[in-house]
Each structure stands twice: as structure tokens, then as C-alpha cells.
Image (tube, rainbow, N blue to C red):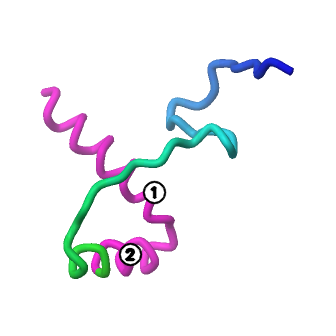
Amino acid sequence: MANSRDDGPADDTAVEGENKTLNFKVSPDFKKEFKGFAGSQGITMTDLLKEGFALSKKRRQK
């Protein structure tokens, strides 16, 4: 069965199974701080990364 894809929300939300792994190394301290901050904000680490990327992209394109 072919997957149909419509133009969904602009926040790049993917259906489960469509996500790809993004691998990169960070220091243990950075990971701990990043994970702790995401948790304290009630969001996932993935959502925090996407939000940070969107903000950085917007700032750098001016």
C-alpha cells in the first residue's frame, strides 16, 4: 500500500515510522543539561532541538 502524503502542518510533524535518526556526539554534560532542560519545560529533546533549529534558522536568515 502506497503512503499518501498531504501538505500537513508547517512544524514538520512526521507520522510515526517516517522519522529518521540524527546521530551526532555531544559531551555528557551537554546531554545532561539538554535533557534536563527539555524535561523541565515539559517537552521532548526532539521538540527542543526542532525549536532551537527553527529559531537559529530564522535569526540567521535576516
Pointers 2 and 1 in contact (C-beta within 8 Å):
no
Residue lying at 63% horizontally and 27% vertically, measured from the top left: 8
Horizontal side, residue 7 vs residue 12: left or right? right
For this rendering, which residue is in front, 1 or 50? 1
Quarter location, residue 15: top right
Q: Is residue 15 above or below residue 37?
A: above
Residue lying at 50% horizontally and 66% vertically, measured from the top left: 43
| Mark 2: few/some/many CA within 10 Å (<14, 14-19, 20+) | some
Does 50 lie within the magenta span? yes
Residue stretch rendered in magenta on the structure: 33-62
Q: Position of residue 45 (x, y in %)?
A: 43, 64
Q: Amino acid at mark 1?
A: Thr
Q: Which is the main secondary structure of the residues drawn in magenta? A: helix
Q: Which of the two labelled residues, at mark 2 and mark 1, occupies the earlier sequence position?
A: 2
For this rendering, which residue is in front, 6 or 16? 16
Label 1 secondary element: helix
Residue lying at 31% horizontally and 81% vertically, measured from the top left: 32
Q: Position of residue 48 (x, y in %)?
A: 39, 59
- Quarter of the figure with the N terminus: top right
Q: Amino acid at mark 2?
A: Lys
* Residue that badge 2 annotates: 35
Residue lying at 67% horizontally and 43% vertically, measured from the top left: 17
For this rendering, which residue is in front, 20 or 50? 20
Q: Position of residue 39 (x, y in %)?
A: 46, 77
Does 26 lie within the magenta span? no
Label 2 secondary element: helix
Q: Position of residue 10 (x, y in %)?
A: 51, 30
Which mark is drawn over residue 46? 1
- What distance separates the C-alpha of mark 2 from that of mark 1? 10 Å
Q: Is residue 16 above or below residue 44?
A: above
